Amino acid sequence: MSMLTPPGMGGKYRITGMSTPHAPPPPPAQDRPRVRRRRGRARRGRLGTLQLVDVFSGDEGTKTTAGKQTDCKPVPKASAAPAAAFPKPAQITVNVYNATPRSGLAKTTADELKKRGFKIGKVGNAPVAYDKKVPGTGLLLGATTAVKGALPVLGTQLAGTTSKADTRATADVDLILGTAFKTLSPKTTADAALVALTKPAPVPTGKC
């Protein structure tokens, strides 16, 4: 008698363990459906990790904001020419010419430029081509190489001048005093302008 048969029952009412249907056996491994893993979520997770690394990592001397580096190191301010290209006043020979109706301006101006370290060449009235024909404070003349060298240095001594290149082959430059000329800039102002020209102050490239 089976353990599943109630007491007092037998014969055709006997219950055996074989009367209970068995669950179908699992299909072979090759017939099972394959479950593919979604790679998009994992890939996004890795990208997010890389972005976090970019945000919180950075080189010394830089500030990192939203994955972008901002260089806070100061850089020299751009100027008309490199500082090494500008000669010193003692290396510049200046010819001073008076193109105004007032007399004596060329001599007094040349004397003041000499005190400020410039070499003085010729002093006198302006050539006919420029006499009483320079409307501003002054006209600076020199060779092509002087336009970005000696002329800017000389221009720091007098505001409102105009620079022009001519065909001379010599290194000397001309200062032709115009009708609006009164006097040279104060020495302190000229010295500050010369420093700003030859040694530009560094400026930061970003907010630190």
Image (tube, rainbow, N blue to C red):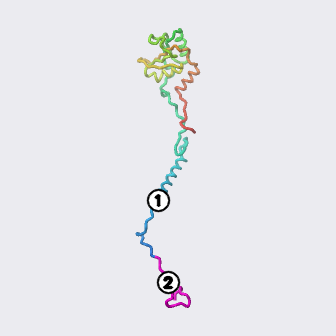
Neighbours of disc 2 within 10 Å: few (<14), some (14-19), many (20+): few
Q: Which residue is drawn at 52% across and 43% down?
A: 68
- What amino acid type is highlighted by mark number 1? Arg
SS for tag 2? Answer: helix
Q: Amino acid type of disc 2? A: Gly
For this rendering, which residue is in front, 132 or 202?
132
Secondary structure under tag 1 reads loop
**The stretch drawn in magenta includes residue 22:** yes
Q: Where is residue 47 in the image (x, y as percent from the top left)?
A: 49, 52
Residue 133 x %, y %: 47, 13
- What residue does disc 1 label? 38
| Dot 1 alpha-carbon crowd within 10 angstroms: few under 14, some 14 to 19, many 20 or more | few
> Which residue: 56% across, 38% down?
207
Q: Residue at horizontal 46%, vertical 58%? A: 39
Comparing 24 with 53, the one in front is 24
As displayed, is residue 73 above or below residue 14? above
- Is residue 55 rendered magenta in the image? no
Determine the CA span between mark 1 and mark 2: 45 Å
Please report the bounds of the magenta region as a residue range: 1-23
Q: How many marks?
A: 2
Labels 1 and 2 touching (C-beta < 8 A): no
Which of the two discs, 1 and 2, labels the residue nearer the N terminus?
2
At a point 43% along the width and 69% down the height, the residue shown is 32
Which residue is denoted by mark 2 in the rendering? 17
